């Protein structure tokens, strides 16, 4: 860092918000963050930030920042010392473990945890307490992406990177409103469009958005229509021989496995049966009924359009990138749609090549780095390993210096089950860090009622009061972002490190410190032997052992101090990797070898047969509309931080209900009228917005879950993908009435 002429000292950090992972310069003066700006030297964003990034400096200075531990006394939260709070938590956890076993306690974390926080939590719960009841909120957004990667490639995270967006010429967006949810990344598509006349952006979605405004073509689709449409695109690719025969022969296996096989191929010990291999001809036969006409009925996309899309994907002169995020992942068959998009790229050979790749976008700053690479899901261990596999438990135990028997082979509760277990009275203690599930979960009232009935002892560590601190027994004030040292991993496998730049307010403490102090009180302090002086370096080097030699190699800690991140695998010469299955690094890919899915079965990737299935709930006479919840530009997630920035709050004060003008007219609803929206799970009142920023297709309504005054996700069904266990926030049935 360096000081400028106004006495502001500038340091580097990744943005605190979305998975794009913009490189930010943080200006500090007199112990406070006074400014932030996009780093012109940052390869991710080249100096740009979105509006959230520009106001980052204000996100930490809301008036109601939590500064002291608080303990519940009846209906009141009373100030307490750290000792009192931590002793109470320790006694409650010890009591529950002694009475009902380690699986009666849990921790629920976040893709906003730093790598150190996620690693500490995982080591403590999986290696110390002996339960796999640890989940990141990434289960709500990226679990289907993980299951998609694991089942197709047997290795998590993308083969390509952001450079593909500069080098490609065709972008097919599946239900992704990138202009609002990944704005800086979207600007790279637009920059390319301005330079290259050939560039085509195709937006396939259930509503017109700001992304549509910049797209060359908008293709409206029914909810769950992607599952049929992608299958029909594959049908045409096969029928019209648009596939790359040589690539397929060399790099692809065809599979039709146990359709609900969990967790991908590594989970052999837990799989009910081995996936049955298919020949290419058998696969073609299976795909025959999935014609464009069949898909038109299920997706609403005209058969002709599906044919055109298939020919765009199959056009050898086009460099095609597919992009998607929650529209695909938050889906009862999210894993399948991930698999199907990979199928298109594997069949056409448009994969692992500069400028043509599928790119699964992430929502949180370290959904990749912490939730996935560290292995904080309830079935995972670091570097793609899983708790069900004996060799993986053994390797983990060796690095952690513990008895392998200490790690349970049973996957812990996944997110929805974790909250259902509170309702059932089976989970006695849960510690929530860095996330706000009592606003974000689907079918929310069920879990809020259980918490309010004090069915479990709830600890919440956060930086502001939230809907989750409302139901807590203990609230712990946390340090945030540059108030601590950390590492995040973004969408393109980029690992970014930053140093602590300012002190947290009052008595706020890092989540890592909170966990280790708790660990000491329950007899597991020995798991964290790192020295005071080199605490993070020592923890990093221990964690790094998991990655070395796996194709996910991280660099020594100091390497990250001076760079704007490195994309793994970091090669033996210290350089990053842009295209992980093709770049020459003798450890994984030999010169002249071409594409090598080096961790796939026989070095090949799997093309899965994934048929159509209907949604968990569809509109009917009583509940005739599709309800979809999502994000917008100004706020991030449940707005716990962006809601404290006056400029962002003024720009977007509350959620509205976007509705099609014809639907509104039929119901006698005018713009800005109050409307009551009800599902089988609950109802709420929202302001109708007709022809606003987002324009849903007829029969669809859309709203945003950032607004803490309304439990938006309460209406959502908590049905989940049977493979990834990710809930479907994108479709359920509601009715609309004038309020
Ligand atoms: Fe970049 Fe996302 Fe931060 Fe906006 S919110 S500045 S796009 S990382």
Image (cartoon, rainbow, N blue to C red):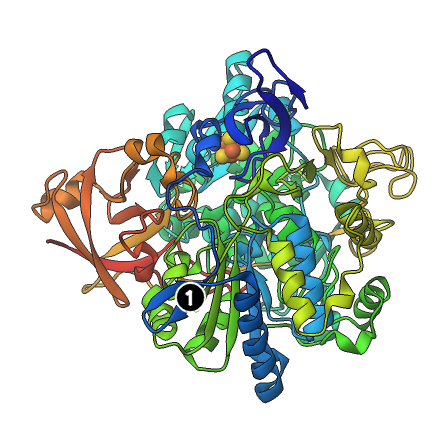
Relative vertical location of residue 516 with respect to residue 228 in this rendering, above or below: below
Percent across and percent down for residue 130 are: 69, 75
Q: Quadrant of the N terminus?
A: top right
Q: Is residue 149 visible?
A: no
The residue shown at (24%, 59%) is 734
Left-right relation of 707 to 174: left
Seen as rendered, the residue at the extreme bottom is 99
Kindly tell me whether mark 1's CB lies below 8 Å from ligand 1: no
Front position in the image: 323 or 436? 436
Relative vertical location of residue 287 with respect to residue 493 in this rendering, above or below: below
| Residue carrying label 1 | 472
The residue shown at (49%, 37%) is 173
The residue shown at (7%, 46%) is 668
Relative vertical location of residue 168 with respect to residue 15 in this rendering, above or below: above
Q: Is residue 538 visible?
A: yes
The residue shown at (46%, 34%) is 178
Relative vertical location of residue 626 with respect to residue 34 in this rendering, above or below: below
Percent across and percent down for residue 270 are: 69, 74
Front position in the image: 585 or 700? 585
């Amino acid at each position: 860092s360096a000081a400028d002429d106004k006495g502001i000292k500038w340091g580097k950090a990744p943005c605190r918000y979305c998975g794009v992972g913009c490189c930010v310069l943080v200006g500090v003066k007199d112990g406070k963050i006074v400014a932030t700006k996009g780093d012109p030297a940052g390869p991710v964003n080249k100096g740009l930030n979105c509006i959230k990034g520009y106001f980052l400096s204000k996100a930490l200075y809301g008036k109601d920042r939590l500064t002291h531990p608080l303990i519940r006394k009846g209906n009141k939260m009373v100030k307490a010392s750290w000792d009192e709070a931590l002793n109470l938590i320790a006694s409650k956890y010890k009591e529950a473990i002694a009475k009902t076993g380690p699986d009666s306690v849990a921790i629920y974390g976040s893709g906003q945890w730093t790598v150190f926080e996620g690693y500490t939590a995982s080591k403590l719960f999986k290696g110390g307490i002996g339960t796999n009841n640890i989940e990141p909120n990434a289960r709500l957004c990226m679990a289907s992406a993980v299951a998609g990667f694991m089942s197709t490639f047997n290795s998590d995270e993308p083969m390509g990177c952001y450079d593909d967006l500069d080098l490609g010429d065709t972008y097919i967006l599946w239900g992704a409103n990138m202009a609002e949810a990944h704005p800086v990344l979207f600007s790279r598509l637009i920059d390319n469009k301005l330079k290259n006349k050939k560039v085509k952006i195709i937006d396939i979605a259930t509503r017109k958005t700001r992304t549509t405004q910049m797209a060359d073509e908008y293709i409206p689709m029914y909810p769950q229509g992607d599952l049929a449409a992608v299958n029909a695109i594959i049908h045409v690719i096969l029928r019209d021989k648009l596939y790359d025969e040589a690539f397929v022969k060399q790099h692809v296996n065809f599979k039709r496995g146990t359709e609900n096989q969990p967790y991908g191929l590594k989970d052999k010990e837990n799989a009910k049966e081995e996936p049955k291999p298919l020949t290419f001809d058998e696969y073609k036969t299976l795909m025959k009924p999935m014609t464009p006409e069949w898909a038109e009925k299920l997706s609403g996309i005209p058969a002709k359009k599906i044919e055109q899309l298939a020919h765009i994907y199959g056009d050898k002169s086009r460099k095609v990138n597919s992009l998607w995020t929650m529209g695909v992942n938050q889906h009862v068959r999210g894993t399948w749609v991930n698999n199907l998009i990979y199928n298109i790229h594997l069949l056409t050979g448009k994969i692992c090549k500069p400028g043509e790749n599928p790119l699964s976008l992430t929502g949180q700053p370290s959904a990749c780095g912490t939730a996935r690479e560290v292995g904080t899901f309830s079935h995972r261990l670091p570097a793609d390993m899983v708790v069900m596999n004996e060799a993986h438990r053994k390797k983990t135990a060796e690095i952690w210096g513990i008895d392998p028997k200490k790690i349970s082979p049973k996957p812990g509760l996944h997110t929805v089950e974790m909250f259902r277990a509170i309702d059932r009275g089976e989970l006695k203690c849960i510690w929530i860090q860095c996330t706000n599930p009592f606003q974000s979960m689907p079918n929310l009232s069920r879990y809020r009622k259980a918490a309010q009935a004090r069915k479990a002892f709830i600890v919440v560590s956060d930086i502001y009061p939230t809907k989750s601190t409302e139901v807590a027994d203990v609230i712990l004030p946390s340090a945030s972002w540059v108030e601590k040292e950390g590492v995040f991993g973004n969408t393109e496998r980029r690992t970014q490190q930053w140093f602590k730049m300012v002190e947290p307010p009052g008595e706020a403490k890092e989540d890592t410190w909170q966990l280790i102090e708790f660990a000491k009180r329950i007899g597991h302090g020995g798991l964290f032997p790192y020295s005071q002086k080199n605490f993070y370096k020592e923890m990093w080097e221990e964690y790094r052992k998991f990655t070395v030699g796996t194709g996910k190699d991280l660099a020594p800690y100091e390497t990250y101090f001076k760079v704007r991140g490195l994309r793994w695998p970091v090669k033996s010469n210290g350089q990053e990797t842009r295209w992980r299955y093709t770049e020459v690094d003798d450890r994984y890919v030999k010169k002249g070898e071409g594409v090598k899915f080096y961790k796939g079965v026989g070095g090949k990737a799997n093309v899965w047969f994934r048929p159509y299935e209907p949604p968990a709930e569809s509109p009917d006479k009583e509940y005739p509309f599709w309800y979809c919840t999502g994000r917008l530009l100004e706020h991030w997630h449940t707005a716990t931080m962006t809601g404290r920035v006056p400029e962002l709050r003024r720009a977007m004060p509350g959620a509205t209900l976007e509705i099609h003008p014809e639907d509104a007219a039929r119901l006698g609803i005018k713009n800005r009228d109050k409307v009551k929206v009800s599902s089988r799970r609950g109802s709420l009142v929202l302001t109708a917005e007709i022809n606003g920023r987002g324009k849903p297709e007829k029969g669809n309504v859309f709203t945003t879950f950032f607004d803490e005054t309304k439990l938006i996700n309460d209406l959502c069904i908590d049905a989940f993908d049977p493979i990834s266990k990710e809930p479907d926030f994108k479709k359920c049935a509601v009715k609309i009435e004038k309020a």
